[in-house]
Image (spheres, rainbow, N blue to C red):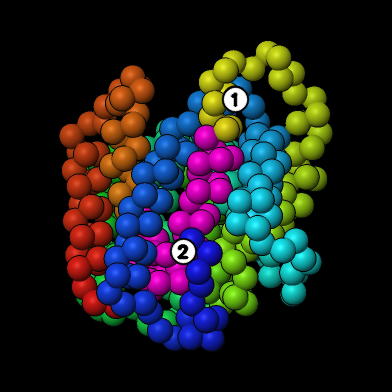
């Protein structure tokens, strides 16, 4: 996991063969774990406000990432060069996480997951100015098809709402965070200086936590943790350990082997996995029109993945 491509080469070339396949498999697992974050995040958001909840999550994540980086992987605990890189990346991720939890107070996990699937198209747009990375027409077509399916899910398959552009408050809030995450992905490669992935992840987590202290510390201190149900503890543990730490490593791994557009293209599977998980959790199954939109996003992903970079 800590093996990295040279930073200079990583800006202009992509991995081939087995390494590329590993990148695709990493992002497939990424989509599964991200889907869980929306469902479990929705459970936690019922009992806590977004700011203290996000800060609590990241405090736990710092501990996990420190254990991975400086314990399991035995990375030297040295102050990183150009610390501003991690403050900028951490700020983008902090905005993304805050908007996700805030959005879940207004809308459903399926709707926020659908907004998340717009990220690859945005990331492909940012890849050009950040990396000089152009998206092939075929790949772009796959992104557009999948984005159309995502829009269908966002509007819950209601043509009248699409024509009226009736977007909910939660969806608009989360879209701002999705834009930040879309910029974050190509910046990972841009800011790579050859650090081990786990060390890079720890410092990004630390940067995000710094930004989250001001809005979240007062609410976190005032929280009556004894009154919270076990589901909140389980959800925060999943978000801190599995989603934040796990998906960061997967995203870091894949972003060094695949183009930015294909990396987050796997996010198109998120609504399908969320629909499945929400049904399993007993929260109800999506309607057939919404399922059709999720199927369209999956087809767009298949087209994009099969085409050359």
Q: Nearer the viewer, residue 258 or 130?
A: 258
Q: Nearer the viewer, residue 106 or 23?
A: 23
> Which class describes the residues within 10 Å of circle 1: few (<14), some (14-19), or many (20+)?
few
Point out the stretch of residues depicted in magenta.
238-267
Q: Is residue 114 above or below residue 42?
A: below
Q: Is residue 283 above or below residue 246?
A: above
**Residue drawn at (40%, 72%) of the image:** 257
Query: Which image quadrant for residue 17?
Result: bottom left
| Left or right of residue 10, residue 57 in this image | right
Query: Which quadrant, please, contains the C terminus?
Result: bottom left
Residue 253 numbered mark, or none: 2
> Which class describes the residues within 10 Å of circle 2: few (<14), some (14-19), or many (20+)?
many
Q: Position of residue 168 (x, y in %)?
A: 45, 40
As for residue 260 lying within the magenta part, the answer is yes
Asked if residue 239 can be seen in this view, the reply is: yes
| Left or right of residue 55, residue 170 in this image | left
**Residue drawn at (52%, 81%) of the image:** 6
Residue 233 numbered mark, or none: 1
Q: Is residue 232 above or below residue 303?
A: above
Residue 106 numbered mark, or none: none
Q: Main secondary structure of the magenta part?
A: helix
Q: Considering the numbered disc 1 on the image, is that residue within a helix, a strand or a loop?
A: helix
**Residue drawn at (67%, 39%) of the image:** 60
């Amino acid at each position: 996991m800590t093996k990295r491509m040279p930073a200079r080469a990583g800006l202009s070339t992509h991995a081939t063969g087995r390494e590329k396949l590993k990148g695709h498999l990493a992002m497939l697992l990424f989509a599964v774990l991200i889907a869980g974050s929306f469902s479990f995040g929705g459970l936690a958001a019922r009992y806590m406000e977004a700011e203290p909840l996000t800060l609590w999550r990241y405090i736990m994540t710092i501990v996990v990432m420190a254990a991975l980086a400086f314990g399991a992987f035995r990375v030297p605990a040295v102050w990183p060069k150009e610390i501003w890189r991690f403050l900028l990346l951490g700020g983008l991720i902090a905005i993304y996480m805050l908007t996700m939890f805030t959005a879940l107070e207004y809308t459903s996990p399926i709707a926020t997951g659908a907004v998340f699937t717009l990220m690859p198209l945005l990331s492909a747009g940012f890849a050009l100015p950040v990396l000089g990375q152009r998206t092939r027409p075929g790949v772009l077509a796959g992104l557009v098809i999948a984005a159309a399916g995502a829009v269908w899910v966002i509007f819950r398959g209601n043509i009248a709402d699409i024509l009226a552009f009736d977007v909910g408050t939660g969806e608009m809030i989360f879209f701002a965070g999705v834009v930040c995450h879309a910029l974050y992905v190509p910046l990972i490669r841009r800011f790579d200086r050859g650090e081990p992935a786990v060390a890079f992840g720890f410092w990004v987590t630390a940067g995000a936590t710094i930004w989250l202290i001001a809005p979240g510390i007062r609410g976190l201190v005032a929280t009556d943790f004894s009154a919270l149900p076990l589901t909140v503890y389980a959800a925060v543990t999943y978000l801190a350990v599995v989603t934040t730490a796990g998906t960061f490593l997967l995203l870091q791994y894949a972003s060094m082997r695949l183009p930015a557009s294909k990396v987050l293209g796997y996010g198109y599977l998120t609504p399908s996995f969320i629909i499945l998980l929400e049904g399993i959790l007993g929260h109800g199954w999506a309607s057939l029109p919404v399922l059709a939109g999720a199927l369209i996003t999956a087809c767009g992903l298949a087209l994009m993945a099969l085409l050359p970079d």
